[in-house]
Image (cartoon, rainbow, N blue to C red):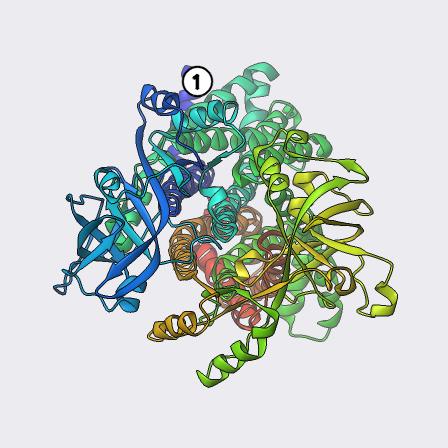
């Protein structure tokens, strides 16, 4: 141990650990920064998303809850509130309007805050603190009853004063049942209205919030006790659009963590390779002095263990400080009150650092214990050969484990891992091929160009590895800058400004022309009307099914209610066929050949496969049809979507109504009120709250990812530095020999810049190509968005590769031009 510490101090003073420790510190720092910041962002995104249901967990029922549900939650230290929602007429002056009344307890909502307008020009976020005899109402009620804050309204047998306008609500069921204006009242006032009678249509909600582990444990326990009319929901069940946005946010943040791990491994591998080469002579001397192989191995293992612990601690401190500074520097996030991160990101970063140290340095260290004592006399003896399969295999196992761990998604981890392995092999092979091709093309170039290319070709394997590492680092830099911007733009374009923000339901067949004329008169885009037929799934492959046929609550709920079926000749443009074939639209072909297309998610939930025969009951009449295709539905399109679509001939004779979605510009809300007055049977549903929530989430994630990636870029810079430093000793020897033979500083300067220009050109070309390919893979296979590569990747990538490598190379070799040959040899 004493000898190991003495050697460590000597190497520390000599700068031997500079690259390796810098790589490890920045590796752990990058992973810790990404992990800590991502953990805080995920927590706050989850908290913001839970505002859609007003809690972490929500139980809905058509009957009052068993008292033990509340007791179970309170015993776990969780906060609990109850609410009741029911339809009722609200009156003002001589007008009445059907509205959705929600009575809530003090403390509601448990997650999120309601934005209120007090009618005096002030706005504030608030939880419910309603006094007896007061209510809060939304814009729809104010407009349609010509109300103002301070007016009196009648609900049932009681009268209430409107004390605030709801600007932004939480816990709103955005669906076909939530079509009426909303009114919030205190639960203490419900009895006075006289509306809670036997047989009243009331929806009961029990909302729970608190520590994540306790909430999850409660949810697991409740699922085993819920009755058929009770449904358990969390944020993932609130809306498919929110779930998709959260999943894409996870993909972006997972990409940052993966990129840091990749670049850290490459930098450490290059640093370990140089460290081994520079210690061959010292090991040979110690072998001559009687050192055994085991002693040498322990000497270096002690050094690496001590240095590794120190580097990991420094990396953790760097990561924690960096994410804290990052949060404070972004006003929106500082004001959002991000929760403190947990310990898990720090543990993951520590484990990742030691795993990288083991995977990329342990086996090279084994080479040092086998150094021959003859190297003292025969310097031409290289490093002992180690099993390439063993070295690459261990590094590969470490990378696979880290990828799958940091990705948070098996699909994302395997996708990036496969791309990395293929890219590294392809980059190295292409670099070797292009280097030899360029050498043949430049036979008639200047003397310094010819010698530069000859030097590179002579060390073609080493140069290929160097170009591969530089290309990987450059690709990461391009992915994290230009490609990331293209991906974020593509994600944001999934919700363009004219995304439909209203649903129109219950259009009768004879009203289609009149409704279309109304939209034309209002100078709005024509409606894309979709037919809807209600039917209940009663059998799969002639086997009767009901709620008892499934154990999963969601599957039970699906078969216990009626499906909204539709029919269409063409596949909706916001749907994607994943298996099977769509019918050709020819009625003659589809007659007698009943066909169905089923959304892939519900098919998995209900165990439906391609070719199955489904039996539906529609208004007492049954039909049987075969599943001929499965579809992927883009729920975040905010358009009308259906789980099941049939051929037109199959459903045309059944009772049908039509529905559609449309975009209503801000300031034209009264158009929806006029539509409801002209066609009283129509339901106009406002989905703007969901769209704004998704847009806000995309904006915040975009900003968060942009900031996180700035720290991941440091790993890319370390790769560039380590790649250039890995050949510095060999280049120094060549410079000493050339100076001995009479070369001057100008000749060395031109020679080195020529070599670095070639390396930079090859690296830039491969980095730009890899970045475009990686962007395409991430867009289509991970994020499910359209990817359009901008030309900036090429315009910046190739010249930047040449410029950065030449600049870094010049900084690393400039002192060689000023030193004597003897001075250079003494340095190395």
Residue in the image at 37% along x and 71% along y: 673
Closest to the observer, 541 or 664: 541
**Above or below 463: residue 9:** above
Closest to the observer, 93 or 730: 93
**Above or below 86: residue 572:** below
Residue 666, position in %: x, y? 35, 73
Judging by the rendered image, the residue that carries numbered circle 1 is 3
Can residue 292 be seen here? no
Residue 144, position in %: x, y? 30, 68
Residue in the image at 73% along x and 64% along y: 652
Q: Which image quarter: residue 66?
A: top left
- Total marks shown come to 1
**Furthest residue toward left:** 120
* Neighbour tally class for label 1: few under 14, some 14-19, many 20 plus, Cα within 10 Å: few
Residue 336, position in %: x, y? 27, 49
Closest to the observer, 130 or 222: 130
- Residue 386 is left or right of residue 177, and the answer is right
Secondary element under disc 1, as helix, strand or loop, is helix
Residue 489, position in %: x, y? 49, 65
**Above or below 640: residue 527:** below
Can residue 468 be seen here? yes
Closest to the observer, 732 or 784: 784
Residue in the image at 52% along x and 41% along y: 261
The quarter of the rendered structure image containing the N terminus is top left
């Amino acid at each position: 141990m004493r000898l190991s510490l003495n050697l460590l101090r000597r190497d520390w003073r000599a700068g031997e650990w500079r690259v390796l420790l810098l790589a490890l510190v920045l590796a752990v720092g990058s992973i810790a920064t990404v992990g800590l910041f991502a953990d805080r962002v995920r927590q706050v995104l989850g908290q913001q998303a839970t505002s859609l249901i007003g809690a972490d967990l929500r139980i809905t029922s058509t009957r009052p809850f068993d008292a033990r549900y509340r007791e179970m939650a309170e015993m776990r230290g969780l906060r609990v509130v109850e609410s009741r929602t029911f339809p009722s007429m609200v009156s003002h002056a001589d007008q009445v309007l059907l509205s959705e009344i929600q009575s809530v307890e003090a403390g509601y909502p448990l997650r999120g805050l309601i934005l209120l307008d007090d009618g005096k020009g002030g706005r504030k976020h608030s939880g419910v603190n309603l006094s007896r005899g007061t209510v809060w109402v939304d814009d729809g009620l104010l407009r349609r009853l010509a109300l103002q804050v301070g007016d009196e309204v009648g609900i049932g047998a009681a009268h209430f004063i409107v004390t605030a306008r709801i600007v932004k609500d939480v816990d709103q069921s955005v669906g076909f049942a939530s079509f009426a204006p909303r009114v919030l009242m205190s639960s203490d006032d419900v009895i006075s209205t006289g509306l809670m009678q036997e047989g009243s249509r009331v929806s009961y909600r029990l909302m729970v919030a608190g520590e994540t582990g306790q909430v999850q444990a409660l949810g697991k326990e409740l699922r085993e006790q819920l009755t058929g009319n009770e449904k358990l929901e969390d944020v993932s069940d609130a809306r498919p659009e929110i779930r998709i946005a959260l999943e894409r946010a996870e993909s972006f943040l997972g990409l940052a963590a993966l990129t840091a791990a990749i670049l850290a491994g490459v930098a450490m591998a290059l640093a370990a390779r140089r460290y081994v080469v520079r210690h061959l002579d010292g090991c040979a001397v110690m072998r001559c002095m009687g050192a055994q192989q085991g002693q040498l191995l322990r000497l270096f293992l002690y050094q690496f263990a001590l240095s590794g612990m120190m580097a990991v601690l420094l990396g953790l401190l760097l990561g924690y400080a960096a994410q804290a500074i990052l949060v404070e520097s972004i006003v929106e996030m500082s004001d959002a009150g991000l929760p403190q991160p947990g310990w898990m990101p720090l543990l993951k970063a520590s484990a990742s650092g030691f795993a990288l140290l083991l995977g990329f340095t342990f086996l090279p260290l084994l080479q040092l214990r086998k150094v021959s004592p003859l190297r003292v006399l025969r310097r031409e003896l290289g490093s002992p050969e180690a099993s390439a399969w063993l070295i690459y295999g261990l590094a590969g196992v470490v990378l696979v484990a880290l990828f799958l761990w940091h990705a948070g998604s098996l699909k994302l981890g395997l996708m990036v891992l496969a791309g990395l392995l293929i890219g590294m092999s392809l980059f190295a092979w292409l670099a070797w091929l292009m280097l030899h091709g360029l050498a043949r093309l430049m036979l008639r170039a200047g003397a310094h160009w010819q010698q530069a290319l000859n030097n590179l070709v002579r060390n073609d394997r080493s140069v290929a590895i160097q170009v591969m590492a530089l290309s990987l680092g450059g690709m990461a830099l391009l992915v994290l800058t230009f490609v990331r911007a293209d991906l974020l733009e593509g994600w944001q374009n999934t919700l363009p400004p004219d995304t439909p923000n209203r649903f129109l339901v219950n259009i009768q067949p004879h009203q289609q022309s009149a409704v279309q004329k109304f939209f034309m008169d209002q100078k709005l885009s024509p409606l894309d009307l979709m037919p809807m037929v209600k039917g209940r799934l009663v059998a799969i492959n002639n086997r009767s099914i009901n709620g008892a046929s499934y154990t999963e609550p969601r599957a039970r709920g699906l078969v216990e209610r009626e499906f909204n079926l539709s029919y269409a000749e063409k596949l909706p443009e916001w749907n994607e066929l994943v298996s099977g074939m769509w019918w050709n639209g020819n009625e003659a072909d589809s007659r007698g050949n009943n066909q169905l297309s089923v959304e892939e998610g519900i098919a998995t939930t209900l165990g439906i496969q391609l070719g199955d025969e489904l039996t539906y009951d529609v208004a007492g009449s049954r039909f049987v049809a075969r599943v001929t295709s499965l579809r992927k539905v883009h729920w975040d399109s905010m358009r009308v979507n259906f789980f099941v679509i049939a051929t037109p001939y199959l459903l045309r004779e059944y009772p049908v109504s039509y529905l559609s979605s449309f975009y209503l510009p801000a300031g034209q809300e009264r158009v929806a009120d006029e539509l409801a007055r002209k066609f009283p049977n129509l339901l106009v549903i406002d989905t703007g709250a969901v769209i704004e929530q998704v847009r806000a989430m995309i904006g915040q994630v975009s900003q968060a990812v942009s900031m996180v990636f700035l720290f991941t870029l440091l790993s890319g810079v370390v790769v560039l530095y380590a790649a250039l430093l890995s050949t510095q000793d060999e280049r120094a020897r060549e410079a000493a020999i050339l100076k001995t033979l009479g070369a001057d500083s100008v000749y060395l300067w031109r020679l080195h810049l020529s070599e670095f220009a070639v390396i930079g050109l090859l690296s830039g070309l491969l980095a730009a190509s890899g970045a475009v390919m990686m962007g395409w893979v991430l867009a289509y296979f991970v994020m499910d968005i359209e990817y359009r590569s901008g030309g900036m990747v090429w315009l910046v990538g190739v010249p930047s590769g040449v410029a950065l490598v030449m600049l870094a190379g010049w900084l690393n070799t400039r002192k060689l031009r000023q030193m004597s040959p003897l001075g250079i040899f003494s340095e190395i």
